[in-house]
Amino acid sequence: MWLSHMLNLQAIQVWQTHKGLRWKFRAVTVEPPQQCPGCHTSTSFLKYGRKDFRFDDLPLHGLPVRVRLTRQRYKCVHCSVLFFPSLDCLDASRHATRRLVEAIARNSLHRPFSHVAKEYGVHEATVRRVAHSFFQAVDAIAHLPTPRWLGIDEVTIRGTPRIVLTNLQHKLVYDILPDTKPGTISTFLRRMPGREEVAVVCMDLCTQYRKIVRDMLPDAVIVIDKFHLIQLGTKAVDHVRRALKRRRGVRLKYDTRIVRKRRHNLSAQDQDALEYWKASVPALATAYELKESFCEIWSAPTQSRGRALYQAWEKQCLTLAPDAFRPRINQVRQWQKEVFNLFKWPNITNGYTERVNGIAKHVNRTTRRLAFDALRVKLLYVHGYRRPPTGAKLEPKTEWPELQVLSGEEDYAGPVPLPPKDTVAALADTFIREHEWNDSPQARPGRRVETLEDVRRMENATRDDSDSATVQRSLSEVA
């Protein structure tokens, strides 16, 4: 009795199985070749010996699967070419099935390599090679639309500052550059398709970025991020706080926490401490009030109102705390045009870019020895592609088309909603259907159920195995 239902691999019949620390199967090929791969015309072949091959498959019942396949070798009568019939279920360059390699590639995009390796029972180097090959192919066919609102910021990863570019209008990652050199940024912006469509660029107070954007994107309006403006006032108050603490006899309580808070976020305990400042250290209380007035300027309804408030605040600062606030005032004067563009574009902020910086640091912490290219692809194709519209009703993931492609089941009649064309799932399906991986690491089976076919394999595997007599009869028939 054949046991092929346990693996459900096309053109392969299982005749023996053993369950230990892993599933071990013995199998044979059953379909003869259709034509010669050498001359592509002959259909006359001679059997020319057999050879055993070993390959791995997706896990079964939580255990790895190893298959020892006996393949028949043939010789063409016309051109004398020796060959083995090709098997579509096996990966062309690895000792593994296609569905195992596809499962590793899909999960490597969303999860750390070490987690994928542990769950699938493979070596981390195998996952890394499969993932890098997958990332390169996906990056070659992907295209992200040029953002109308471009956000620029930098994040330090593994001791090297990187440039993060985001689409602020749709809250998507646009790209990540390997360094902050002017040549790298200029080359990227010069080659960016549709760069004339960029209307606004949001950045911090970096002179280098401003010069590059003016040269490469002359039609774009530069807007300074509101968060970095508020930081100017916070730094001025912190300057006063540090100067007071260096003096002997001055003791402050909760000073660091209060300086960084806005007035409406102060707790009752913080407000009591602020009252103590007014009585004992009025210089610090005055600096805090000036900081709050500075923050309120950028909430003005019009640009003219904001300029009037800023001029009044500037005179007050130069009178009450000139040493702490004069450097910040000079900095605003150098960026006066870009700073007051904030009133024309009140909805522009680099908050999403700062969030991406945090995600990049988290991914870097949770992955070991992850190269920059892999980190970039993980962020770009997880956080850079559009998601389904908010509130859209989607069917369970196990019934999505990409899983149907993996399973190969033609009689599946469940609901199959089409995902958006620019989702990561659709991009991955396009790659898996149309591309091959060139590396050839020896993969080992994993420990995860990925497709509808896996579920059905596990259900079929619960059937009673045949007795030893049946196995021996099957073996004799094969011989």
Image (cartoon, rainbow, N blue to C red):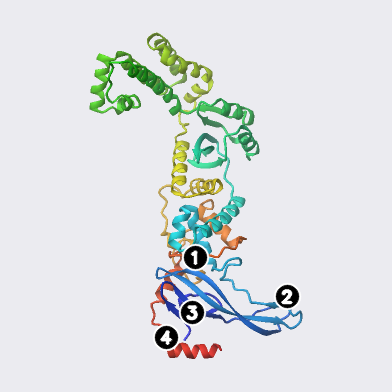
Q: How much space separates mark 4 and mark 3, taking CA atoms?
A: 12 Å
- Mark 2 = which residue? 40
Residue under label 4, please give it. Answer: 466
Q: Of circles 1 and 2, which is in front?
A: 2
In the depicted structure, whether residue 305 falls above or below residue 7: above
Q: How many marks?
A: 4
Q: Nearer the viewer, mark 4 or mark 3?
A: 4
Residue 415 falls in which quadrant of the image?
Answer: bottom left
Amino acid type, mark 2: His
Residue reaching furthest front?
A: 248
Marks 4 and 3 close (CB-CB < 8 Å): no
Judge the density around disc 1: few (<14), some (14-19), many (≥20) Cα neighbours within 10 Å: some
Work out whether 420 lies above or below 58.
above
Amino acid on which disc 4 is placed: Ser
Of pointers 3 and 1, the one earlier in the residue sequence: 3
Query: Badge 2 local density, few (<14 within 10 Å), some, or many (20+)?
Result: few
- Closest to the camera, between mark 2 and mark 4, is 4
| Residue occupied by mark 1 | 404
Who comes first in sequence, dot 1 or dot 4?
1
User: For mark 3, what is the residue?
Assistant: 4
Q: Secondary structure at mark 2?
A: loop
- Distance between mark 2 and mark 4 Cα atoms: 41 Å
